[in-house]
Amino acid sequence: EAGVTQFPSHSVIEKGQTVTLRCDPISGHDNLYWYRRVMGKEIKFLLHFVKESKQDESGMPNNRFLAERTGGTYSTLKVQPAELEDSGVYFCASSQRDTINLYGYTFGSGTRLTVV
Amino acid sequence: SQQGEEDPQALSIQEGENATMNCSYKTSINNLQWYRQNSGRGLVHLILIRSNEREKHSGRLRVTLDTSKKSSSLLITASRAADTASYFCATDAIPTDKLIFGTGTRLQVFP
């Protein structure tokens, strides 16, 4: 079974530019989450999709961040315009609702975003 | 903030020694999970313990959970240099389905 795939693995952009991160969850997983770890600090929740619907976006830092999950499959996270403080590692995770308590979540390898 | 706390923040040991990391959290939970992050890489799921369990083993890992104290510990026995990484506890909070991570423990194992 393929795991959670994130693309790109690294991205270096200039302040003010736009970057789009992509996450392909495990096939059949309804739940999809975005998290980020900024500057070696704690890992913070950004948002949660159930299929194509945003279940919880309370962690989105501001309106420069836009997440979508068209058709309930892959998800994108767009940062526009990027600021220096957006640098960090962005993680995506997926889970199946009825097996969360057995297997937990599967995380992708992350996208390391550097804004210069 | 609902973030959990982990201690110690950093731990340095020699190969072969045991490493113990502790985690405290604030809310009622469905389960508690431990993850590892090697430098610059993704999060790897290590072990999940449900709220009605008190202890769980997986290979060299032993996890305990005390829901009355809202705390958990991760013990890595006979550590190896390859265990060098950051370790995070994460709680699957009630009633949400999102993980809330602890602050992490940075473990360094010297050969």
Image (cartoon, coloured by chain):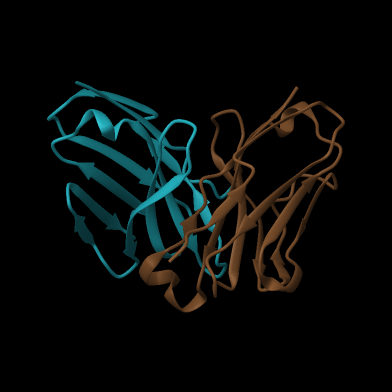
| The quarter of the displayed image where residue B96 is located | bottom right
> In the drawing, does residue B107 fall left or right of residue B56?
right
Residue placed most toward the observer, B7 or A108: A108
Q: Quadrant of residue A51?
A: bottom right
Which image quadrant is residue B51 in? Answer: bottom left
Find chain B in the image and tell me its colour.
cyan
Relative horizontal placement of residue A33, taking residue B68 as reference (left or right): right
Residue drawn at (72%, 59%) of the image: A57
Q: Position of residue A49 (x, y in %)?
A: 67, 66
Q: Is residue A34 left or right of residue B111?
A: right
Say which colour chain A has: brown
Q: Nearer the viewer, residue A42 or A89?
A: A89
Looking at the image, how many numbered discs can be counted on the residues? 0
Q: Which residue occupies 59% across, 40% down?
A: A9
Which residue sits at x=68%, y=52%?
A: A22
Instruction: Look at the picture and state if A76 lies above or below A79.
Output: below
Which residue shows up at 17% across the image and 47% down it? B60
With respect to residue B97, does A8 lie above or below? above
Residue at the farthest bottom position: A98
In the figure, is residue B86 to the left or right of A77? Answer: left
Find residue A107 and report its horizontal and vertical position in percent.
Answer: 49, 54
Q: Position of residue A93 (x, y in %)?
A: 54, 57
